[in-house]
Image (spheres, rainbow, N blue to C red):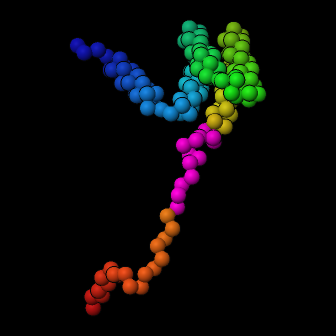
Amino acid sequence: MFGSNRMGASAYANVGVETGVAAASPHKLVVMLFDGAMVAIASAIQHMQAGNIPAKGQAISKAITIIDSGLRASLDKKVGGEIALNLDALYEYMSDRLVIANIKNQPQILEEVHQLLKGLKDAWESINPEAARPVQAVAPAAADPLAPQPNRLVKA
């Protein structure tokens, strides 16, 4: 009468993702792109092993789109200099490898790209600007012998 549970769960998940994207910092958005590409590749591996060729192709296409239209497109080659150029070349390599994995049905290539993405994600997370903010420690107040002390009644 009201649709399937699967459709409801999918809609709920989409709202969660959209809310996460809207509230995320630019740094977190890049982490989400890495996660999305890695999930798509893991899905492609499962579909490849199950022999589900259409789903495998869709998952690989999704990973390529995230890498090219998300990660690669977000590079600022003017500001990022050599690092941005190297990342651009690496993202191009990953996309090319995913195409080959799809054509030749080779899960080891998918695993290679997954590991490359994981390494980049780990490095990116280690430079999280929000985690790098210095925490100001509060120095303990010097003990004032004249300050009122808590009531320390001892019951006998």
Which residue is the extreme one toward the bottom?
A: 156
Instruction: Provide residue 146's location: percent of width, then percent of height.
Output: 38, 85
136 in the magenta segment: yes
Q: Residue at x 69, y 8 (%)?
A: 103
Q: Quadrant of residue 6?
A: top left
Left or right of 9? Residue 79 is right
- Where 139 sits versus 155, above or below? above
Region rendered in magenta: 125-137
Left or right of 72? Residue 14 is left
Which residue is the extreme one toward the left?
A: 1
128 in the magenta segment: yes
Q: Quadrant of residue 119?
A: top right
Viewer-closest of 63 and 105 = 63
Image quarter (top left, top right, bottom left or bottom right) of the N terminus: top left
Q: Residue at x 63, y 36 (%)?
A: 124
Q: Residue at x 56, y 48 (%)?
A: 133
Instruction: Provide residue 87's location: percent of width, then percent of height.
Output: 71, 25
Viewer-closest of 1 and 132 = 132
- Where 105 sits versus 75, above or below? above
Q: Is residue 39 visible?
A: no
Instruction: Provide residue 128's location: percent of width, then percent of height.
Output: 59, 40
Magenta span dominant secondary structure: loop
